[in-house]
Image: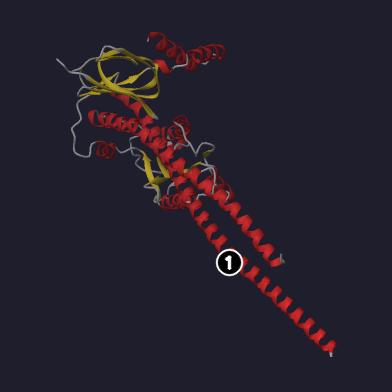
Amino acid sequence: MGAQLRVYKRRIRSVTATKKITKAMEMIAASRVVKAQRKVAASTPYATELTRAVTAVGTGSNTKHPLTTQAETVTRSAVLLLTSDRGLAGAFNSNAIKAAEQLTERLEREGKQVETYIVGRRGLAHYNFRERKVAESWAGFTDEPTYADAKKVAAPLIEAIEKETADGGVDELHIVFTEFVSMMTQTALGDRLLPLSLEEVAKEAAPKGEILPLYDFEPTAEDVLDALLPRYVESRIYNALLQSAASKHAATRRAMKSATDNAGELIESLSRLANAARQAEITQEISEIVGGSAALADASAGSDR
Amino acid sequence: MAAELHVALVAADREVWSGEAKLVVARTTSGDIGVMPGHQPLLGVLESGPVTIRTSDGETVVAAVHGGFISFADDKLSLLAEIAELSDEIDVQRAERELERAKAEGDATAERRADVRLRAAAAS
């Protein structure tokens, strides 16, 4: 076998191996998307009931709470950025980071100090590399977040917002995550999570203008709100984590699918080249044989005479 | 009155139980509360404790609920809990181990949680 042909054969073998790996990753990601979507669906009843309850307290009483009161002048805000631990997900992480950076820039233009909280190793690496300050970060659960993880993330954020701004607290909380629209579309978006506007929550809970009954609060409206709002924030963060995970898997699936397709194309063109090289080799061998026998024939014809 | 309660017991990550019931007893921060059809709209904070649901066909469902809310309106009752387990899902041996460990370490929350699990398992 000629050297040229051997090089082509080797490259085809290595690309085939890569293709097998990307194909497997694509299939794993596809099954994980379904699982993540199921988790989003499973968490929906809790979220809807919680939203209803928050609306009920919000509309049924005039209770004030640090999580719902808008500070008169916002001097410091927190941005929670959700990324993934692992890459190989196309533009998933860079889109989320870009959205967070745009939001941060906008907030800073408005004269606010921004504290960044990050979930996921990718986002953290990005910020650390640029030596930007990160208030707190979490990693290790982005593929399959549980409610306990959401609680872990929410706790310091709620604490920060309940603290007075002068003591290092924040006035508002924004969350940047990747919304799972469909298998093909995932959009990174920034949302203001806190302070909660009860009107917006009410609109979400009862879009058809459904009238909520007058509740009897046990023990009191303040206590109920006190217990409800942190849970509501946790459930929102949980939902964002789940959507982010689903989006990440969908992005991985797409990236791996195009990698598999590209590998297929590469194999095809490499096989063409290998075939051409083999053909050239054969042609050369034939012409060498023909040339050799012609020379022999010429030589023997000459010696006869 | 043939009214029934439509009960939904939901944990943060799944729906644990749903169905029709005649009576639901749960523990709020200000004491046990029993809800029957036609109760006044209610929204309360739950303590860690067992929840007893008497279903329409006379069965009793017991669940261990750790923190959450009870909300009731229009004969629809929802129990929201961060963690909720039906009594037959509870691993008694594990809960006993947990209880002992929590006692040894003096972890009051974990001790209470394990205790609630055991009591819910024993009640069914």
Amino acid type, label 1: Arg
Residue found 66% across the figure and 59% down from its top: A10
Residue A3, position as x, y percentages in the image: 72, 66
The residue closer to the viewer here, A149 or A286, is: A286
Which residue sits furthest bottom?
A305
The N terminus of chain B - image quarter: top left
Task: Report whether residue A254 is seen.
Answer: yes
The residue closer to the viewer here, A156 or B61, is: B61
Residue found 52% across the figure and 38% down from its top: A136
Residue B120, position as x, y percentages in the image: 40, 12
In the drawing, does residue A289 fall left or right of residue B106?
Answer: right
The residue closer to the viewer here, A56 or A222, is: A56
- Relative to A169, say whether A297 is above or below: below
Residue A58, position as x, y percentages in the image: 27, 31
Which residue sits furthest front?
A304
The residue closer to the viewer here, A106 or B124, is: B124
Task: Report whether residue A77 is seen.
Answer: no
Residue B20, position as x, y percentages in the image: 25, 20
| Figure disc tally | 1
Q: Tag 1, which chain?
A: A
The C terminus of chain B - image quarter: top left
Which residue sits furthest left?
B1
In the drawing, does residue A120 fall left or right of residue A300?
Answer: left
How many neighbours does mark 1 have within 10 angstroms: few (below 14), some (14-19), or many (20 or more)?
Answer: few
Disc 1 target residue: A272
Q: Is disc 1 placed on a helix, strand or loop?
A: helix
In the drawing, does residue A291 fall left or right of residue A150?
Answer: right
